[in-house]
Image: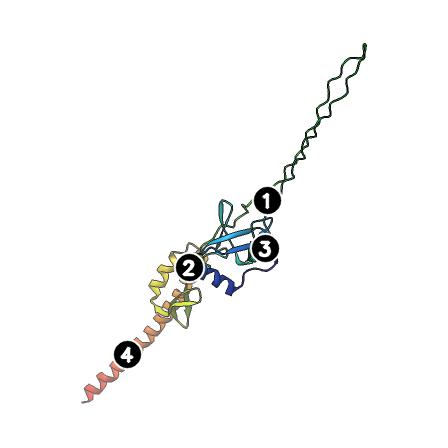
């Protein structure tokens, strides 16, 4: 019995079809299954392979345990469950009656009973093996990014490799509220410095525009007086 290789994709599909038809295919445990390698069991169910690598449920004795395809191989026809053989007890020896003795001073020694053969118990391999806890796949990680570049604040969101929201512009006040949720003084100071620099630049532009507007209004007043 070759139990060195695991189940192939085609063999798993054949087992799935057999289960759908009401049959329970026999499989043999490979060396990857540990101490029960070479034993034979029956596949009773196939769970979701996306949830756990051990999705092949095998009945072995009274247990139904999940295994991965690498732990199993298709059992050859006629293969039965191999059980460790217990040594047979040797039959008790029939005592041979001793001839009578006619001795006056010799005490009678009782006939010794033949020693019963000792039967050593062979430890059977336990069908229960360490089963890895199936860890359900959780949702992909979510990343929300607040960025500042070229005088604009943008927010983007991405879950795994999927972009949920492309970078879009937010107001500086909204950016400051988002940063306030992060209790990191260094981050808040950096944002406040950026906002202070923007505020100073905006004030300079406003003063410049006011001066230009004042010149234009004075020129307009002169033209009105001339007209």
Q: Earlier in the sequence, mark 2 or mark 4?
A: 2
- Checking the image for residue 209, the label placed there is none
Image quadrant occupied by the C terminus: bottom left
| Pick the front one: 178 or 133 | 133
Q: Mark 4: which secondary structure?
A: helix
- Separation of residues labelled 2 and 1 (CA atoms): 32 Å
Q: Quadrant of residue 95?
A: top right
Q: Position of residue 42 (x, y in %)?
A: 50, 52
Q: Position of residue 107 (x, y in %)?
A: 78, 12
The nearer-to-camera label among 3 and 2 is: 2
Q: Mark 1: which secondary structure?
A: loop
Visible residue check, residue 148: yes
Q: Position of residue 110 (x, y in %)?
A: 73, 18
Q: Mark 2: which secondary structure?
A: loop
Task: Identify the residue position indicated by label 3 in the image.
Answer: 30
The nearer-to-camera label among 4 and 1 is: 1
Task: Identify the residue position indicated by label 2 in the image.
Answer: 21
- Separation of residues labelled 4 and 1 (CA atoms): 96 Å
Image quadrant occupied by the N terminus: bottom right
* Residue at position x 38%, y 57% in the image: 180
Q: Position of residue 17 (x, y in %)?
A: 44, 62
Task: Identify the residue position indicated by label 4 in the image.
Answer: 213
Rendered position, 90 above or below 190: above
The nearer-to-camera label among 4 and 3 is: 3
- Separation of residues labelled 4 and 3 (CA atoms): 89 Å
Q: Earlier in the sequence, mark 4 or mark 3?
A: 3
Residues at discs 3 and 2 in contact (Cβ within 8 Å)? no
Q: Residues within 10 Å of mark 2 (few under 14, many from 20)?
A: few
Q: Residue furthest bottom?
A: 227
- Separation of residues labelled 3 and 2 (CA atoms): 26 Å
């Amino acid at each position: 019995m070759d139990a060195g290789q695991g189940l192939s994709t085609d063999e798993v599909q054949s087992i799935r079809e057999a289960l759908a038809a009401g049959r329970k295919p026999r499989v043999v445990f490979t060396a990857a299954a540990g101490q029960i390698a070479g034993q034979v069991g029956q596949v009773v169910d196939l769970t979701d392979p996306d949830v756990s690598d051990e999705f092949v449920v095998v009945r072995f004795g009274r247990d139904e345990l999940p295994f991965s395809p690498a732990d199993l191989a298709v059992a050859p026809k006629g293969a039965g469950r191999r059980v460790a053989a217990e040594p047979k007890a040797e039959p008790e020896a029939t005592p041979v009656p001793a001839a009578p003795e006619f001795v006056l001073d010799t005490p009678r020694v009782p006939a010794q009973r033949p020693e019963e053969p000792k039967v050593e118990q062979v430890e059977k391999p336990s069908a229960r093996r360490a089963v890895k806890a199936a860890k359900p796949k959780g949702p992909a990680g979510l990343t929300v990014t607040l960025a500042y570049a070229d005088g604009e604040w943008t927010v983007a969101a991405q879950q795994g490799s999927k972009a949920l929201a492309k970078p879009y512009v937010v107001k500086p006040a909204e950016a400051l509220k988002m940063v306030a949720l992060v209790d990191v003084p260094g981050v808040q100071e950096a944002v406040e410095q950026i906002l202070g620099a923007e505020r100073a630049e905006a004030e300079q532009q406003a003063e410049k525009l006011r001066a230009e507007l004042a010149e234009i209004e004075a020129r307009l007043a002169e033209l009105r007086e001339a007209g």
